Image (cartoon, grey):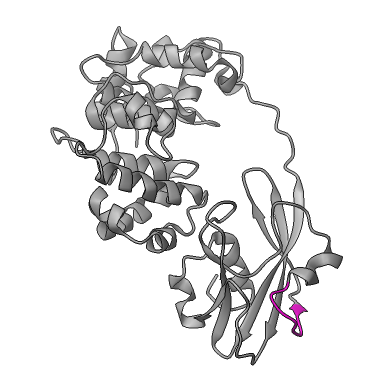
């Protein structure tokens, strides 16, 4: 339970006092008095992109248990990293994670400390660079995520959608940063947005910034931040082909770049475009008595929603289609199938839902 807000005449001080009292014990967060580990900070920031803390916690622990240092991760085969990442989505992150680990491990100084140098690493954008610089090295960097955008929009009653006024949001956040504790200031703002200044039901009574909040004075907390008009995602159709041979299932290794790049998957139609049902058969890995399962599987990607018909068939063929291999049904859980493919496997009764 969040306690009552900590009173202070300065918003930055009030924020840090609240954070000191209410900060969560997260597996990637350094304990009080402990020097942050840049590897753990960076790993958590990559894993948390487009993903919730609840979804990442156990996956983070498993990742760290298997590869406790950046050097260990750099030495790992990419296949193992992709398999461990399966289910977290946005699979380009896993490939960049591995590439970044190798770059850092090859560098005599390890992780660079300033934002500009961090941004030159594979997969490290402006937000991640700022977060690592501030949290791991206590540099005066301002990391702005969705939580910070929401807090700043309400604190200053900023009417425009945050992404349209990014410099204004960043400057507002920078004004709250402590020169002595920039890393804690960054984490405090994120924590406040996650625990108190929630999207639908902000707990203003528990907020340390409540006395300074323009949206609260207006009684219009729910009106901020302004929302972008959402354009409906285009819908695409496709098909997934599950071919079985005894207790084995056919898998295809996907190209390094593109959707599910470098991962194992069932043969399927391309998901980069809508494929009419009449054209599904031309993408089957081989001629067989294909049977469509009753209902399609659905999956929502960043830029489109997919409805995929699952086809199953059995074969006794001794040859293997190009770019494919046979995997034992018992090992499917170890193959690191993308979430969509796991849905298809569950629909076909190959794995548990």
Q: Quadrant of residue 139?
A: top left
Q: Quadrant of residue 193?
A: top left
Residue 297 coordinates in the image, percent (x, y):
68, 64
Residue 105 coordinates in the image, percent (x, y):
25, 46
Residue 145 coordinates in the image, percent (x, y):
45, 29
Note whether 23 is above or below 148 in the view shown. Answer: below
Note whether 113 is above or below 288 in the view shown. Answer: above
Of residues 130 and 272, the one nearer the viewer is 272
In the rendered structure, the answer to whether residue 109 lies left or right of residue 177 reads: left
Of residues 154 and 91, the one nearer the viewer is 91
Q: Main SS type for the magenta part?
A: loop
Residue 250 coordinates in the image, percent (x, y):
58, 78
Note whether 51 is above or below 315 in the view shown. Answer: above
- Residue 246 seen in the current view: yes
Q: Quadrant of residue 119?
A: top left
Residue stretch in magenta: 284-291
Residue found farthest to the left: 33
Tell me the quarter of the image containing the C terminus. bottom right
Tell me the quarter of the image containing the N terminus. top left
Q: Is residue 350 magenta?
A: no
| Residue located at (60% from left, 82% from top) | 320
In the rendered structure, the answer to whether residue 254 lies left or right of residue 211 reads: right
| Residue located at (31% from left, 14% from top) | 12
In the rendered structure, the answer to whether residue 72 lies left or right of residue 297 reads: left
| Residue located at (55% from left, 60% from top) | 339
| Residue located at (53% from left, 75% from top) | 351
């Amino acid at each position: 339970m969040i306690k009552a807000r900590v009173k202070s005449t300065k918003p930055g001080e009030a924020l840090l006092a609240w954070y000191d009292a209410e900060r969560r014990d997260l597996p990637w967060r350094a304990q009080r008095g402990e020097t942050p580990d840049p590897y753990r900070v960076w790993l958590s920031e990559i894993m948390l992109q487009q993903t919730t803390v609840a979804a990442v916690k156990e996956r983070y622990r498993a990742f760290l248990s298997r590869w406790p240092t950046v050097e260990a991760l750099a030495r790992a085969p990419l296949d193992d990293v992709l398999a461990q990442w399966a289910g977290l989505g946005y699979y380009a992150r896993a490939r960049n994670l591995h590439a970044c680990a190798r770059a850092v491990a090859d560098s005599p100084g390890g992780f660079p400390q300033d934002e500009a140098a961090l941004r030159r690493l594979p997969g490290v954008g402006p937000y991640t660079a700022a977060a690592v610089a501030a949290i791991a090295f206590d540099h005066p960097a301002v990391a702005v995520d969705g939580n910070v955008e929401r807090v700043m929009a309400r604190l200053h009653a900023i009417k425009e959608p945050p992404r349209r006024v990014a410099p204004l949001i960043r400057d507002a956040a920078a004004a709250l940063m402590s020169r002595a504790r920039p890393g804690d200031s960054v984490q405090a703002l994120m924590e406040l947005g996650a625990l108190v200044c929630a999207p639908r039901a902000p707990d203003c009574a528990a907020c340390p910034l409540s006395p300074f909040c323009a949206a609260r004075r207006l009684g219009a907390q729910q009106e901020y931040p302004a929302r972008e008009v959402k354009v409906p995602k285009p819908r695409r159709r496709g098909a997934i082909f599950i071919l079985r041979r005894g207790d084995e299932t056919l898998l295809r290794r996907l190209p390094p770049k593109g959707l599910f790049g470098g991962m194992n998957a069932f043969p399927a139609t391309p998901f980069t475009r809508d494929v009419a049902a009449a054209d599904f058969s031309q993408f089957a890995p081989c001629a067989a008595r294909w049977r469509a399962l009753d209902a399609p599987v659905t999956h929502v990607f960043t830029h489109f929603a997919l409805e995929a018909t699952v086809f199953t068939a059995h074969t006794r063929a001794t040859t293997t289609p190009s770019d494919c291999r046979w995997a034992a049904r018992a090992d499917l859980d170890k193959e690191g199938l993308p979430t969509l493919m796991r849905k298809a496997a569950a629909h076909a009764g190959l794995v548990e839902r």
